[in-house]
């Protein structure tokens, strides 16, 4: 998993929204975050700067809440992980089939999908990044 710039975010690769709104979670991210087939997915908004969204699980979000003394995260929608490391992104998240997002390690509590901004622009200059 590369970093594109010194001290930048770790990058898993590109994820393309499929025709039914589905995405494939990169294998390394699947393992790192402990995602499980059939498990609940929590969708949260991305930052204003990078757009997109992030996914997590109730368990990981509980850890954040405990660590930050009851902090609450804005939840856009919920879903379930499929057997093939896929998840369907609900319409509330605001992406459409064909959108290309950059999968990044946002934190240890969630997987980020960046839609714009400096890190996205830098990634466009790296054709070696894997596409999922």
Image (tube, rainbow, N blue to C red):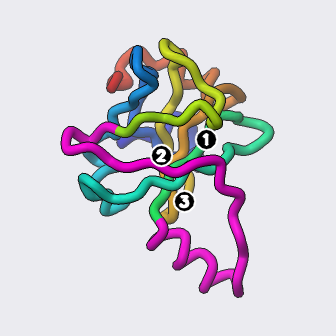
Question: Is disc 2 surrounded by few (<14), some (14 to 19) or many (20+) residues within 10 Å?
Answer: some
Disc on res. 10: 2
Percent across and percent down for residue 26 are 32, 39
Residue at 40% across, 28% down:
22
- Give 27 or 60, whichever is nearer the viewer: 60
> What is the span of residues highlighted in magenta in the rendered image?
58-86
Distance from disc 2 to disc 3, alpha carbons, whole Å, reads 10 Å
Residue at the extreme right of the image, as rendered: 48
Q: Is residue 31 visible?
A: no
Q: Quadrant of residue 32?
A: bottom left
Magenta residue check for 19: no
Percent across and percent down for residue 51 are 70, 34
Circle 2 or circle 1, nearest the eye: 1
Label 1 sits on a secondary structure element that is: strand
- Vertical side of 60 occupied by 104: above or below: above
> Which residue in the structure is indicated by mark 3?
107
- Mark 2 or mark 3: which comes first in sequence? 2
Distance from disc 3 to disc 1, alpha carbons, whole Å, reads 13 Å
Disc on res. 6: none
> Which residue in the structure is indicated by mark 1?
53
Left or right: 36 in relation to 50? left
């Amino acid at each position: 998993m590369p970093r594109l710039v010194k001290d930048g975010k770790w990058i898993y690769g590109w994820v393309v929204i499929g025709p039914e709104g589905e995405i494939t979670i990169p294998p390394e991210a699947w393992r790192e975050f402990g995602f499980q087939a059939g498990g609940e997915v929590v969708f949260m908004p991305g930052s204003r700067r990078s757009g997109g969204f992030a996914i997590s699980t109730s368990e990981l979000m509980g850890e954040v809440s405990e660590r930050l003394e009851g902090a609450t995260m804005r939840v856009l929608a919920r879903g379930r992980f499929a057997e093939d490391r896929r998840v369907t992104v609900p319409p509330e998240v605001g992406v459409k089939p064909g959108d290309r997002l950059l999968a990044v390690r946002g934190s240890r509590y969630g997987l980020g999908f960046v839609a714009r901004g400096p890190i996205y622009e830098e990634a466009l200059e790296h054709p070696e990044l894997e596409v999922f």
